[in-house]
Amino acid sequence: MRRLPGVVLLGALLVVVPARAQTFRYASTGDLLTLDPHSADEALSNSFKNNIYEGLVRFNEKLEPEPALAVSWKAVNPTTWRFQLRKGVTFHDGTPFTADDVVFSWSRQKSKNSVMASHVSTIKSAKKIDDYTVEYVTEGPDPILLRNLTEHFIMSKTWCEQHATTEPVAGLSEETFATRHENGTGPFQVVERVPDTRTVLVPFPKWWDLPNKRYAITRAEFRPIANAATRLAALISGEVDLAYPVAPQDVARVEGQKGFRVIRRPELRVVFLGMDQWRDESLDMPGSKKNPFKDVRVRRAVYQAIDEEAIRAKVMRGMAAPTGLIIPENTEGYDAKLRERYPYDPAASRKLLAEAGYAAGFPVTLDCPNDRYINDEAICQSLVPMLARVGIKVTLNAQTKSKHFDKILRKSNNNTSLFLLGFSPETADAMATLLPVMTMKLEGSGAWNGGRYTNPKVEELVGQIRVEMDPEKRRKQIFEALKIHKEDFGHLPLHEQLIIWGARDTVDVVPDPRDRVQLRFVKMRQ
Amino acid sequence: MISGILTRLLQGLGVMLVVGLLAFAVSTKLGDPVNNMLGQNATIEERESMRRELGLDQPFVVQYARYLGRVVQGRLGVSYRLGVPVGELLRERLPASVELSGMAMLLTLLVGVPFGIFTAIRRRSWLSRVILGGSLIGLSVPTFLIGLLLIFLFAVQLQWLPSSGRGEVVSLGPWTTGLLTASGLRSLLLPAITLALYSLALLLRLVRGELLDVLHSDHIRFARARGLPERSIHYRHGLRNALLPVITVAALQLGNLLAFSVVTETVFQWPGMGLLFLQAVQFVDVPVISSYLLLAAVAFVLINLVVDVSYRVLDPRVRSTVGGS
């Protein structure tokens, strides 16, 4: 018989005894940083927010917006949105949810200290019309407002005022009550939290969506386990029911274990290469007065020298979906017609290099993280000989993500010639990639455009996509922008990595493409 | 004696200043914390403004001066990662680390010293050979590997002990302890053994070596000649003289166990300061990194002080020569 650790036994005694079978225990790499939904914008913390807090709108499992705390909405004019709020919703502490909470949460999330401000930054003002009607006025027409509202978390005004936490904490300010306590409207409430050890949740008995609930658990315990081998051990020894991520090399180990399986699906993230397209002289060729990557033939040559199929099969052990498009599937604006990759063709690659005047190749440093994406360093290592075959002498510079991002982003003046990046449009709309990755000239653009790719036509289109309210027209514009970018070889997409979760057979879960475990989609079978 | 201690404390202060500077210099070279604090949706302008707010746009000297000013006032700052005051964070994590390293130290002493004595006295016994061979494993196999092997054996295969975490803890005022619950004790076992193994092997071999040295010295030969019983020779005359260097090494090992249990804590997800430190390094959480290193320096300075004082008590020779230097 499987032995349960004492923690679980003791914990289970606190709830009713038959509930034990429906306790869902899961583990991931780190702990959530804070319970305050406006204080951290980090993968694990973000993955937890929807268990506790909710927005006016939420994503269904296909990442399409659906009503949550708002039952309906309509655009009064292109910049004014009126939301009809759900009646009978209560916060975990029992206070009723009204329009005041929405207006308050908007100002809290938009405040100077909030790191989640980007999701509400286009909202110029919020006005309570009556207790269950709120009006948001946006700066301009905003076609992705609804998607952003899925990350606009509603807190109780009364509760925040009572506990003096009307603003989230920022870098140097002190901790507030909301860091360690929660009071959301969401499906689960926190009953115990020991940082870096465990967070225990139970279903909220007054959740508004209880009649349609899709979860079948009576208790959830989340445990951070940083070390991948220990996490795997916890899964196989039966201490947790689900562990994620599982490294590609451990998939066989989990699948070979009776009673366990691996859940996988493409993640909402594309891993790609970026190239310096703005310096007149490459960082790696001082004195040459040349930057090879300014020539589209060179960018194409690099692309066609990469054997992505080999990367998928060997480096990723099949845990990747090769793509020629910089935005992943499940994203608004995604079009399968653009997905096809240009063929792997070293001969064509060498010819292109010769035409561009680099028949003898050129030296370049490849900047790569070694702890951010699945097998990121290994991908880069495999690129070195592939590019060497066409004459490009690659020096690999793999380092920890903090140093990598520091080097390739704006703070260090985009100090890179060639880099690996994996980007996820978290709102599941193409705009989330177009603006930060593919443009330079628009307001708020370029934060992740390490090679400063820019094309006047793309800039113009993105400016239109930003305010176009007609979905069909907008999709055409996105298609156009992505097509130009693809023909420009502005970046070189490699693949969508897969999310890989290890689970007991008794766990039934809908994996979220953002690599999030949503407790409201978790069922435990007896 | 008092002036000796004062001198030591002053020297300690110097050490702390140097460590403080190094810690700060190193932690500012780990990358850009702002990028970890703000999510990927932040614009370039938002990143710049956060950087200004944290003072990260200032020259290194200014940043260091500000940091020093804060530390002198007893303010260690607020964690970039968790938004919680660093002092509080360290206080919360301290019990877990102290209990882990305390238990490891206990194992080191309770096993290392007797085994060391045994292998010195019964040099040719087969058991001595086994123990000495085993101690080589403790010295040479990396900690994380030992930890993973123990997890594999006792948690996955035999399922006797939990693979990670601290189990159920009990709060005693500001202190939390896992020593009072069955699950806490069970959870402590594997990490404590993992952490202890190196220092245990080290101490065992040291005790053996020192004792062998002493047992070959003149006063032992005279004692044998006088016909004293072997027991008295080994323990009263031999061991007492062999223990001085052992105390120094054991005390420094305690410092090591306390300050550098990073690997063990990570492998076992032990919620102590070592795990906190590693996460801080990955996030470039400068206030936590520098405070932790300062704390480690304080621990070493204090331990050294205690060792010095205990020398004066234990060894009459030190008392007469080093008196007021």
Image (cartoon, grey):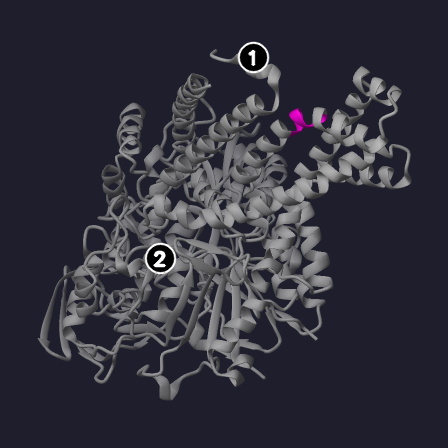
Which residue is labeled 2 in the image?
A: A34
Residue range highlighted in magenta: B242-246
Badge 2 crowding class, 10 Å Cα cut-off, few under 14, some 14 to 19, many 20 or more, is many
Report the amino acid beneath label 2.
Answer: Thr
Q: Residue at x 56, y 30 (%)?
A: A361
**Residue B231 versus residue A177 in the image, above or below:** above
Which residue is labeled 1 in the image?
A: B320
Whole-percent x and y of residue B111? Answer: 72, 43
Q: Quadrant of residue B105?
A: top right
The chain letter for the residue carrying disc 1 is B
The chain letter for the residue carrying disc 2 is A
Q: Quadrant of residue B222?
A: top right
Of tags 1 and 2, which is closer to the observer? 1
Quadrant showing the C terminus of chain A = bottom right
Quadrant showing the N terminus of chain A = bottom right
Q: Is residue B126 magenta?
A: no
Q: Quadrant of residue A320?
A: bottom right
Q: Residue at x 65, y 58 (%)?
A: A250
Q: Is residue A469 left or right of residue B24?
A: left
Q: Is A284 in front, or is A230?
A: A230
Report the amino acid beneath label 1.
Answer: Ser
| Label 2 secondary element | loop
Q: Is residue B112 left or right of residue A408?
A: right
